[in-house]
Image (cartoon, rainbow, N blue to C red):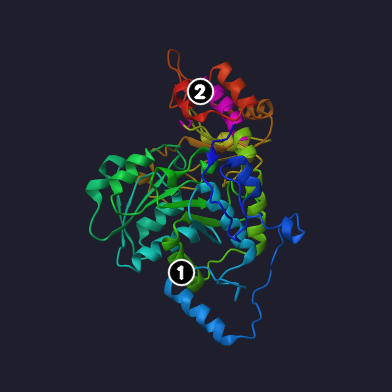
Amino acid sequence: MDTPLDSASTSADGAPRPAPRALATEAVHAGREDLARQGLHAPPIDLSTTYPSYDSRAEAARVDAFATDGAEFDGPPVYGRLGNPTVSRFETALARLEGTETAVAFASGMAALSAVLLTRSALGLRHVVAVRPLYGCSDHLLTAGLLGSEVTWTDPAGIADALRPDTGLVMVESPANPTLAEVDLRAVAHACGSVPLLADNTFATPVLQRPAAQGARLVLHSATKYLGGHGDVMAGVVACDEELAGRLRQVRFATGGVLHPLAGYLLLRGLSTLPVRVRAASATAAELAARLAADPRVARVHYPRIGGAMVAFEVHGDPHAVIGGVRLITPAVSLGSVDTLIQHPASISHRIVDAEDRRGAGVSDRLLRMSVGLEDAEDLWADLDAALGALPEASPGTSSRTSSAAVPGAVRAELRTEPPQVKGLHEALS
């Protein structure tokens, strides 16, 4: 059974809201509480770019108020770059699932991260402390200083010592892309002191962890992935408190990184099945991780302590042969879709990262990253087994090294029939 989420006594429109409600319930109903009273079942899609008003003095006052603190408008919208009702529904729902005051949606995950960096730089806080690995483009954005930021890379234990007076942000990703390395978010948040912690929660989703409850002040998602869930929408979102959200809205307005209303609609729809999708895919991923860990053609398997639908593994032979050998699994970047995807990070998602930095973060040239979808585990294994077929086996007397070894049959059965109890999964795997 889901752990109940904290819930306000009223929704954004003032209507009574039951409290507390489980994650699965919030995923279906958050952002939709007002629909039945309007005689609606599906959320409407508002495609307007502008909105008429006969009171220009009132409009001027509202624009002035937005310029002051970036607060969401009371009353009807003004212009699509300032906000959209359909997108606002998605923001409300995601904030409910992450347990934050609010959320701000953007056209992509990188647009969302860029907005965070710009808000900190505008305050003269250009320095970022970050822990590798991160998503390759996030790493590049920080390292290249394209937005005027300066980064200090460190391990979690070195965060406190890396802070400076001009540090505006600490950034981590857990589980990390692509090695699935995890950090203790609560300990990291403590080490940050008064500096905001941004946690990229794309891989875990609020189904598996809620970083805000562990001290993160900003929670980043590439909503293109699990939140959308079907490989047909590109978006990013930051869940945070209202003070930070106001600045993010101002940057979004000024830079134009807005989310299209149709994408907002698809994301809201995606959230309604998020818990079911993540749990089902996680059960299959645990099964595949166990089989890969026992396979002599595989050198190492990475699978997170909290579970999830991502599996990374290193092969003894040529990883490109595996990419070229799959038939059911799709060889493509991205993740979090209903179908299983596999890619070679050193060639694609992390190619932009300096090779030495990439390898130092654990992204080896033999590493493959697989996003497990909703297909049957036996069909997926048959495809993987065939793709691995041409690779050499380990030499006699050696076995696969793994950060998550075989899953006991009882655990696999539980994952298939119950919501996964993922916290102890890594211990069961190792």
Residue 119 coordinates in the image, percent (x, y): 39, 65
Residue 180 coordinates in the image, percent (x, y): 45, 37
What's the mark number on residue 251? Answer: 1
The amino acid at mark 1 is Val
Disc 2 target residue: 293
In depth, the one of 381 and 262 nearer the eye is 262
Which quarter shows the C terminus?
A: top left
Q: Which of marks 1 and 2 is in front?
A: 1
Element at label 1: helix
Few, some or many C-alpha atoms within 10 Å of disc 2 (few <14, some 14-19, many ≥20)? many
Q: Distance from label 1 to label 2 (Cα)?
A: 46 Å
Location of residue 81 with respect to 288 vertically, above or below: below
* Total tally of numbered discs in the picture: 2
- Magenta region: which residues? 281-305
Q: Is residue 177 left or right of residue 4?
A: left
The amino acid at mark 2 is Ala
